[in-house]
């Protein structure tokens, strides 16, 4: 392979100012710096004379109010940022208004179709974000590739996985920024594996350079800026916070009902059952197998009576069978992708030879959505989009060839550009279709593949993992970074998908999973059963206890979902989100915070009966079980026999909880306030109907709690939701 020959954009020849932006016309292209807000700046660069059409799937906010900007000879200044442009050659430096340099681009350059930016790397700079990645929490020193890939055997070294979110979050003491590199072509980040370790590189196979720079006083503010640009999640239906049970596959209605009945009989709380691919007739999407699932409507009704919802899987591949209505109609209407030389593009997946909808075409999305009516009409509550990288088995690379042409919302592009947004647009079609079918019902869509901005349409589960301790461990940094990358509603297959799990691993994974935003037990075809009771009494009891605890904490969880929709705060948080001044927290990726108050330290080693837990500095911490208090800023040894998950509560917290319930449909009229006294002791409760969008129209309640001089104060801040809890009972450090 020839060494890359990058051409730098070169010297600035002239400058054109227009409104909130400045164009620099250079020797080898044009660079535009556009100010969106005090702290958010967009940089575009093209090697051509003019920019191409302005279009992005990720970006939700395209109109920004005018913000005061001062343009001087070589400086663009806002209230928060000072951007200095050196002209020979062009280089852009981002500094705070008070002069702290955040980052400088060393080069904006091209090699043929490839585009890249080399940037300065400070010696104490740490990197987070990058979406779903299976490497350690801090991405410094790693290289990673954004190209949606089905890789069930991933490790720490895996470059490309299911989801692509090219967002980099940088932090060092006193300097925080983010860069969202909005390019859907195959993209690579080299985060410091450079000869001098003083540079990092962001590069894409093709396309203009188009990045957003977010300055912030904290990582929180960077994440807030990124989600202001790309959007935030909606409130999910409340049942989606419950325990969920899946398997590839429950082969018949009888088998599925048997599992559901076991949950109730054994008093293990659960809200959701799944139908994986075998519910369909020959894997044809939007059908049911008439022999094994003869009466789905009745089955779903029976499940609903028991307090369960049903979610069904829908893959993108449509069986190439002209006797099958989805295929026939799709062909008649031109909904499927074609080969460059003509004829339908076909590829093999579960149904055998398939054709594939072009989800990047709005006409196709509108056609696809209503097919879900057959499912929602009989009571299906959510849609699970799998295989949408897309996975296509009989083509090189396990996906579509690069030259298949997609509509790309009217900007016709090859698969090389559309690949990373194929799954995004499938999930979008599912979401928009569900909303059109049931306008005031919160859609539940779960997707495997995604691109930046997916949070507007779907939650993300982390795809195929393995029943291995190391995969339990990696699910923590994986979901923490996904959470920082705008996707707070996420989680792994609990118990592990591939391989046979063990009782101990299932118990430990269920204990950990109970504190992840998304909590679903799932396992692969051919692996042993891993429902909570399949390893005997001891494991069943441990799982029941962990799942029951999650249900007791649901009011607190629901608060966190509200926060995520509101200000993009992750539900599961790295320690540094809450304690940015504690330098030790940045390296901790075997623990996490659930919201501001609960520190979760899962056991992730076989045979362990205790583990070291780092208590962040800046707070005191109560052991959840014993209510013993410890000072922060130290490691403690937590006892962790199999039935114990090390949990600590931050002093000064009031956690809203309930009595144990079996599913989220159970009426709760009393909120039990667990009070953990501190210097200032506060908490709150968010309530709405858990199902509709009425909360958008003010139908929600907010109640604040304060403990002062031994007395609890209850303050109704908002009362838009009338059917909320009527009684509050306080338990202070374990005492009534
Ligand atoms: O080729 O539908 O990640 O959760 O059980 C495997 C069968 C296809 C992959 C998903 C997994 C699901 C499985 N699917």
Image (cartoon, grey):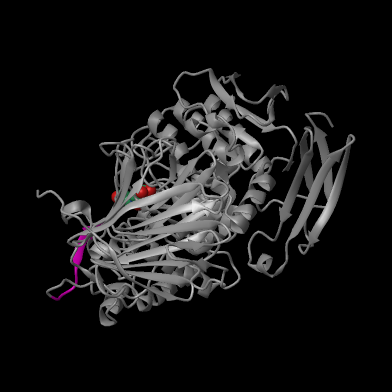
Taking depth in this image into account, of 190 and 260 the one nearest to the observer is 190
Residue beneath the point at 69% across and 22% down: 630
The answer to whether residue 255 shows anywhere in this view is no
Name the quarter where the C terminus is drawn. top right
Quadrant location of residue 374? bottom left
Residue beneath the point at 31% across and 56% down: 389
Taking depth in this image into account, of 298 and 580 the one nearest to the observer is 580
Horizontal side of 137 relative to 30 (left or right) equals right
Taking depth in this image into account, of 70 and 305 the one nearest to the observer is 70
Instruction: Give x and y (percent) for residue 627.
Output: 73, 25
Instruction: Give x and y (percent) for residue 309.
Output: 55, 56
Instruction: Give x and y (percent) for residue 540.
Output: 54, 30
Residue at the far left in the pictured view: 1
Label count reads 0
Is 376 situated above or below 539? Answer: below
Is 344 included in the stretch rendered in magenta? yes
Is 318 included in the stretch rendered in magenta? no
Is 327 situated above or below 575? Answer: below
The answer to whether residue 438 shows anywhere in this view is yes
In magenta, the rendered stretch is 342-350
Horizontal side of 305 relative to 493 (left or right) equals right
Residue at the far front in the pictured view: 73
């Amino acid at each position: 392979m020839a060494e890359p020959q990058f051409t730098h954009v070169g010297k600035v020849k002239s400058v054109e100012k227009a409104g909130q932006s400045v164009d620099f016309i250079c020797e080898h292209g044009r660079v535009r710096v556009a100010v969106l807000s005090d702290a958010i700046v967009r940089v575009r660069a093209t090697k051509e004379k003019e920019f191409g059409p302005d279009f992005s799937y990720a970006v939700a906010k395209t109109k920004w109010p005018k913000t005061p900007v001062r343009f001087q000879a070589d400086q663009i200044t806002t209230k928060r940022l000072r951007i200095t442009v050196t002209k020979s050659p062009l280089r852009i430096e981002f500094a705070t208004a008070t002069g702290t340099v955040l980052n400088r681009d060393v080069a904006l350059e091209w090699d043929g179709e490839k585009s890249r930016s080399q940037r300065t790397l400070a010696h104490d700079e740490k990197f987070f974000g990058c979406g779903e990645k299976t490497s350690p929490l801090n991405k410094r020193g790693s290289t990673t590739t954004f190209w949606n890939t089905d890789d069930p055997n991933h490790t720490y070294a895996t470059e490309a996985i299911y989801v692509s979110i090219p967002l980099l979050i940088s932090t060092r003491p006193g300097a925080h920024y983010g860069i969202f590199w909005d390019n859907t072509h195959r993209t690579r980040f080299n985060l410091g594996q450079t000869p001098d370790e003083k540079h990092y590189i962001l590069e894409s196979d093709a396309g203009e350079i188009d990045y957003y720079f977010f300055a912030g006083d904290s990582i929180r503010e960077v994440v807030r800026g990124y989600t202001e640009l790309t959007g935030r999640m909606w409130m999910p239906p409340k049942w989606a916070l419950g325990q969920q049970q899946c398997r590839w596959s429950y082969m018949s209605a009888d088998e599925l009902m048997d599992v559901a009945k076991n949950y109730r009989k054994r008093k293990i709380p659960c809200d959701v059952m799944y139908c994986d691919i075998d519910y369909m007739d020959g894997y044809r999407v939007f059908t049911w197998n008439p022999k094994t699932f003869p009466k789905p409507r009745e089955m779903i009704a029976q499940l609903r009576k028991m307090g369960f919802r049903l979610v069904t899987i829908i893959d993108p591949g449509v069986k190439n069978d002209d006797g099958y209505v989805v295929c026939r109609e799709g062909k008649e209407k031109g909904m499927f992708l074609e080969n460059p030389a003509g004829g339908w593009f076909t590829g093999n997946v579960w149904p055998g030879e398939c054709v594939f909808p072009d989800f990047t075409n709005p006409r196709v999305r509108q056609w696809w959505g209503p097919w879900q009516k057959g499912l929602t009409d009989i009571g299906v509550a959510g849609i699970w989009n799998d295989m949408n990288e897309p996975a296509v088995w009989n083509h090189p690379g396990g996906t579509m060839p690069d030259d298949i042409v997609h509509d790309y919302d009217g900007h016709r592009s090859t698969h090389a550009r559309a690949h990373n947004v194929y799954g995004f647009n499938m999930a979008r079609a599912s979401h928009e279709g569900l909303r059109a079918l049931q306008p005031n019902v919160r859609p539940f869509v779960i997707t495997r593949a995604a691109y930046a901005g997916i949070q507007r349409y779907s939650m993300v589960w982390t795809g195929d993992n393995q029943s291995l301790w190391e995969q339990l461990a990696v699910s923590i940094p994986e979901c923490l970074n996904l959470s920082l990358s705008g996707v707070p509603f996420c989680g792994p297959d609990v118990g592990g998908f591939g391989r046979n799990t063990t009782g101990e691993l299932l118990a430990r994974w269920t204990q950990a999973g109970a504190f992840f935003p998304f909590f679903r037990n799932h396992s692969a075809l051919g692996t042993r059963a891993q429902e909570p009771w399949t390893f005997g009494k001891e494991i069943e009891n441990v799982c029941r206890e962990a799942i029951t605890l999650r249900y007791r904490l649901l009011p607190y969880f629901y608060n966190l979902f509200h926060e995520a929709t509101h200000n993009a705060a992750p539900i599961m948080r790295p320690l540094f989100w809450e304690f940015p001044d504690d330098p030790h927290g940045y390296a901790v990726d075997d623990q996490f915070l659930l919201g501001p108050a609960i520190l979760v330290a899962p056991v992730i080693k076989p045979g362990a009966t205790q583990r070291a837990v780092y208590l962040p500095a800046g707070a005191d911490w109560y052991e959840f079980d014993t209510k013993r208090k410890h000072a922060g800023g130290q490691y403690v040894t937590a006892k962790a026999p199999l039935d114990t998950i090390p949990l600590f509560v931050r002093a000064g917290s009031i956690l809203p909880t309930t009595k144990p319930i079996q599913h989220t449909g159970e009426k709760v009229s009393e909120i039990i306030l667990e009070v953990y006294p501190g210097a200032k002791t506060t908490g709150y409760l968010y309530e709405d109907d858990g199902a509709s969008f009425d909360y958008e129209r003010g139908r929600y309640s907010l109640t604040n709690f304060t403990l002062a001089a031994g007395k609890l104060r209850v303050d109704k801040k908002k009362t838009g939701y009338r059917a909320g809890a009527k009684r509050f009972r306080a338990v202070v450090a374990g005492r009534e």
